Amino acid sequence: MKKTWKIAGINFDHMHMGDLLRQVHEHPAAEIVGLSDTQPGRMQAVISHFSVPAARVFTDFRKCLEQTRPDLVILCPATAEHSKWTELVAPYRTHILVEKPFAATLAQADAMIAAVAATKKQLIINWPLRWYPAHVTAKRLIDDGEIGRVIEVHFYDGNRGPLWHGADKIETAPTAKRKASSWFYKKASGGGSLLDYLGYGTTLGTWFMNGRAPTEVTAVVDQPKGLEVDEHSVVVARYETGLSKFETRWGTFADPWKLQPQPKCGFVVVGTRGTLASYDYEPSVRLQTEGNPAGMDVPVDVLAPEERGPIAHVLHALAHGQKVGGPLSPKISRIGQQIVDSAVLSARLRKTVKLVD
């Protein structure tokens, strides 16, 4: 790339900001031009790790945007504030990458889409599971017709809990005090395993299904005593092809990036002519077909540089004048959000509901 892309990171609520800014720091055509958070201490690790000059650090996001004029802004606010921050940043006419999930509600997601559409820039929703080689390989096998038309998606994913790790998956020790103060455990902030993880499954599931949406949703959640939010959810979605299941869990036996728990974290996809199992971080995808019903292990694809992470992917698309597609696009992510909203409503009413729109 001839251009050096100017990128700012605004709002450090979510620990993934550190991971995303590491990708910016390591990209040969990108530069961290600004950081902003109302709590300076939350930026300190990034400032130190990536040697960000003091002149590029702000507590007022407006000054950050006015003085640095970034091409792309990364937003990592609490889920319930995704819409607020997107609407605050959009008038500065920059592309916006929001770390998962899309939003706390479909109405907020639509407000985000409208705010960025008015500027002719792109709104991009990053789902880290999109970059796992196993899931990229699974999508390629689906598109190649290896299992026929997708008729079921089964998803189970999560980790020990959001307070067991920080940026770059550095382990931390959760305490009762930290849990009490963390936005992850506050209902008003969009906390809970369902809002944190369900969008992964429903959005990538929609990608696997080539954009098809279900007709109705049934959800059950487990909210431990003393907590405002759930730590476990099971969601069943009815499609015209049958039922699919999406399950989220804070409290897995192990974190999947270190050791796969049981049940394994990832996807099982059923098609009209075969099945595949694609698990997080694994080096192969298990494929069954009509020609080989006993199954075989397919090594994961070697991914092109622009397929290995959101920053490289987005900058590649922008450099070539392309729209970012797949799970990162508002079109696919919005269907994922519809299922999430429907699940929230179903769990509250304790009954099956039509897909929310």
Image: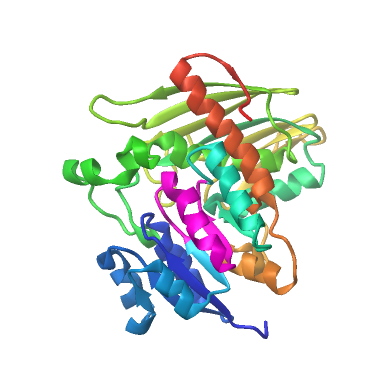
> In which quadrant is the N terminus drawn?
bottom right
In the picture, measured across the screen, residue 30 lies left or right of residue 304, that is left
Q: Nearer the viewer, residue 27 or 352?
A: 352
In the picture, measured across the screen, residue 181 lies left or right of residue 240, that is left
From this view, report whether residue 143 is shown above or below residue 231. below
What residue is drawn where x is 31% and y is 63%? 38
Q: Is residue 93 magenta?
A: yes
Q: Is residue 242 magenta?
A: no
In the picture, measured across the screen, residue 78 lies left or right of residue 308, that is left
What residue is drawn where x is 25% and y is 24%? 225
Q: Quadrant of residue 241?
A: top right
Q: Quadrant of residue 205?
A: top right
| Residue 53 in view (yes/no) | no
* Residue 51 % position (x, y): 36, 82
* Residue 5 % position (x, y): 58, 78
Segment tinted magenta in the rendering: 75-101
Q: Nearer the viewer, residue 228 or 176?
A: 228
What residue is drawn where x is 32% and y is 82%? 54
* Residue 34 % position (x, y): 43, 75
> In which quadrant is the C terminus drawn?
top right
In the picture, measured across the screen, residue 309 lies left or right of residue 239, that is left
* Residue 179 % position (x, y): 24, 42
What residue is drawn where x is 56% and y is 38%? 107
Colour pattern: rainbow
| Residue 213 in view (yes/no) | yes
User: So how many labels did they put on this image?
Assistant: 0
Residue furthest top in the image: 351
From this view, report whether residue 329 is shown above or below residue 39. above
